[in-house]
Image (cartoon, helix red, strand yellow):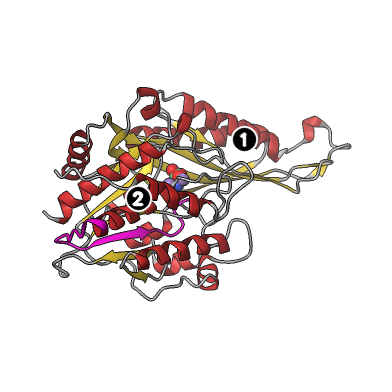
Amino acid sequence: MRNLKVDGDRLWASLMEMARIGATPKGGNCRLALSDLDAEGRRLFIRWCEEAGCTVTVDRVGNIFARRPGRNPDLPPVMTGSHLDTQPTGGRFDGVYGVLAGLEVVRTLNDLGYETEAPIEVAVWTNEEGARFSPAMMGSGVFAGIFGVDETLAKPDNFGPATFGEELRRIGFAGEAPVGGRPVKAYFEAHIEQGPILEDEGKTIGVVTAAQGQRWYEITVTGQESHAGTTPMRKRQDALVAAARMVEAVNRIGHAHPPDAVATVGALQVSPNSRNTIPGRVFFTVDFRHPVDATLSIMDEELKRECRGIAEAARVTVDITDFWYFPPTPFEKRLVDSVRSAAKAQGLPHRDIISGAGHDAVYLARVAPTAMVFVPCKGGISHNEIEDAKKEDLEAGCAVLLNAILAEANA
Ligand code: HGY
Ligand code: MN
Ligand code: MN
């Protein structure tokens, strides 16, 4: 295991320059997938990669690959990267850190005049967040053969009339390259933990052994719109009251499987959303996660049973769509060991950890040996404009990434 260092100041400077694109008043970032700001961030990344001597290709769903040649061009690349798109009230590090840590690996190897055996590629995966177009991890999902190209291009914008494909073309990132279907020697992704464990335990590096499974649902409750002033309480079919009880049930299910289960209703729309009309229709989303698939299945059954019982009692109907699912995903032991060895060689306090968040690495793990490197973020806060991380931790994580990549690129 080599023990090379990276240039933490250069990495921090690049992160702060990227953070100026889509900067929000509270110090975060809003670069929704396939927006003009996402495009601006993509173009800045591409310029930096070309300045670093990489050749850049874009595939049909907008995934970007910056390739640094190796001694043997016939070898499949060792890949790293993450995403540049953010949540609506996102931070400066979620995703961006993994992309720019990959660029820092390239820049460091260039400084050293170091030629790897295998090529190295830094990837930017389209629409990891799933905020504007759902589900999440779409670009990496197509690359891994989970989603089709055409179904992805047809995906509707949650916030407007466009489709994924129309926006991809509008911002100039409808690439020509086929999506996936090519060998990848290994994939490493650096990311902030987005939770409190590393910071609470004073650990610099998270050696990510797996990512927990997720289930996403879309739920529509239909009652009857009627007059707020003239409809007696006993005669109401109030979709919002029923939905509110379902939201409480989601929370209860999350608490019912401690310590790992998490359950979230993140989006809710009321129709007609008029203060003196009893709501006739409510749409909301559910996000369940757990590291054990069997428990995720139990939560699924509980959700459906609870919602049906609540709907019947409230004399409304409920439609539950299983929107997205991926099982708990273990990462490649050999690569996880490389990350752990690199952390040890750098003398960094580290611990094994399971990712609570989904990442593109989850889908890359379907098609390539995959591992992740976590670093702490302040207070474990993420998907929030105040998201913050320490320069020295970001630098340490990037050095671990570099050395783990080298172990693989020269193996
Ligand atoms: O939802 C997630 O875990 C990721 O941030 N997209
Ligand atoms: Mn992320
Ligand atoms: Mn995220």
Specify whether residue 126 is painted magenta.
Answer: yes
Residue 166 appears in view: yes
Span of residues in magenta: 111-131
**Residue at 28 percent of width and 65 percent of height:** 67
Which percent across, then down, holds residue 294?
33, 34
Residue 144 position within the rendered picture, expressed as x and y whole percent measured from the top left: 31, 59
Q: Mark 2 points at which residue?
A: 101
311 versus 369 height, above or below: above
Quarter location, residue 47: bottom left
Q: Which residue is found at the position 35% from the left and 25% from the top?
A: 202
Looking at the image, residue 37 sits to the left or right of residue 290; the answer is right
Q: Is any part of residue 328 visible from this angle?
A: no
Viewport quadrant of the C terminus? bottom left
- Residue that label 1 marks: 312
- Measuring from the top left, give residue 345's x and y in whole percent: 18, 36
- Residue at 51 percent across and 51 percent down: it is 19
Say what amino acid the circle numbered 1 marks.
Glu
Q: Distance between the residues labelled 2 and 1?
A: 52 Å
